[in-house]
Image (spheres, grey):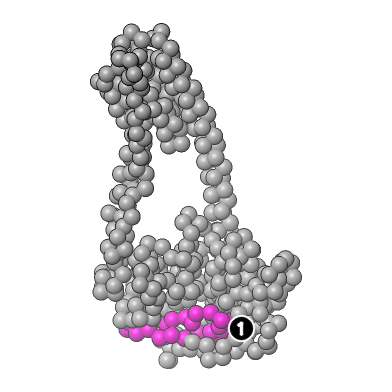
Amino acid sequence: MRPAEAEGEGPYAGSGGRVPGDPAPRDPASVPGDPDDLPTSESPVPPLPPPETRPISYAGTFVRVLPALLLVIGGGYDYMTPRGFTGAPLFTAAPLIAAPLLSRRATILTGVAAVLVVLGLDLRFDEVTEVESLTELATVVTVSLLAVLINVLVRRSHARLDSAWEIAEAAQLAVLPEPVGRIGGFEIAARYEAAQADAFIGGDLYAVQDSRFGVRLVVGDVRGKGMGAVAAVAVVIGAFREAAEHETTLEAVAQRLERALAREGTRRDGIDAFEGFTTAVLAEIPHDDGVVRILNRGHPPPLMLHADGTVSTLPARDPALPLGMGELGTWPDRAQACPFPGGATLLLYTDGLSEARDAHGAFYDPAARLAGRTFPSPGELLRTVAEEVRLHSGGGTTDDMALLAVRRPADECHPG
């Protein structure tokens, strides 16, 4: 900003600084993944450790005060150093950093403050008319105006993103509404965990429908990702709700889903028209009998969590192909009846649960991890499972996860 005092002395080119935004990566060894580290059913699973979020909060606070900090450092540097040294890079950086992070008013105030600091230093050293000083002042004014423009564009982008977020949330509620807590006398809980951060729904699905034949459920996983998978989810759930009301058997419900996916496949182009499929498990719980009927179409088997803490797997005795693959075979659907005593909980899930890996590549085994434990409600069971999977996989999974739990009231006494 100030002319050199000696011949050959030029402006100082300061080294650029790094803006710390992201927290330092955690040591994988610090992520609890051993079964002994997980809480038991007697003590509910606590939320994720607060230290995991504190670095992010501190970094965000630091970045937001960084524009003011740059002005203070730049002003002090320019005031204390000899002529020929300048804090101009810091004065121009301050409004540019404020633009995407702060409000429009704060961005304008940052730009005005940068201009006033430059002008004040020029007046202090009586350099207002110097060419270098005028050039620097014009640069700071220009950058401040550009920062305000950037802030306006960023705010408009955020508004469009908020609108898309609301639409996605509405789509989730329309396609995968959360079931009420009690249906047909049974306690119900559902949970969807998206693998992608801030995502709502993907290719996993669940639905519960009460009918004159009993409470009918479906949990499934559509092959593929993106909007094509979401469209298939909508097709399966729509067909299931219609079939669950009218079809007399669970086998007939599965056939309706098969035909619905076949119709959907004819509307698709490319590989999905030939290889699209959906793994699914359907269940039917009669109102007046202590059993549950299971029909599995290539899906992970459900679990039965008994009131005494024992866990049993309900594998398919007659395996069948996933839905949408009827052209490859004509295996008949056969539902199998399993005891469903009072106080027991039926857990249906997608492979996002059973295929969650830890840092060593070990899968999360829900049957082994839940054995010997009891939970006060289906909702608490799903919350615990979701938190344990998150801890097991180090904070995130590679696949979506849909969970559905149904508990028969303990006061219902049925044989088996």
Q: Look at the picture and state if 82 lies above or below 41.
A: above
Residue most toward the right? 266
Side of 409 relative to 324 (left or right): left
Percent position of residue 115, x then y = 40, 19
| Quadrant including the C terminus | bottom left
In this view of the protein, which residue sits in the foreground, 151 or 40? 151
Residue most toward the front? 8
Q: Residue at x 29, y 49 (%)?
A: 54
Percent position of residue 377, x then y = 37, 71
Q: Can residue 187 be seen in this view?
A: no
The magenta segment? 290-314
Side of 394 relative to 170 (left or right): left
Q: Which residue is drawn at 44% across and 79% down?
A: 346
**Residue 344 location, quadrant:** bottom left
In this view of the protein, which residue sits in the foreground, 212 or 172? 172
Label count reads 1
Q: Residue at x 55, y 73 (%)?
A: 220
Side of 185 relative to 94 (left or right): right
Q: Residue at x 27, y 63 (%)?
A: 30
According to the picture, the residue beneath numbered tag 1 turns out to be: 321
Percent position of residue 222, x then y = 59, 70
**SS at badge 1:** loop
| Quadrant including the N terminus | top left
Q: Can residue 100 be seen in this view?
A: yes
Circle 1 crowding by C-alpha within 10 Å: few under 14, some 14–19, many from 20: many
Q: Look at the picture and state if 287 lies above or below 181.
A: below
In this view of the protein, which residue sits in the foreground, 344 or 391? 391
Give the residue type that dot 1 points to: Leu
**Residue 50 location, quadrant:** bottom left
Q: Is residue 384 magenta?
A: no
Side of 50 relative to 273 (left or right): left
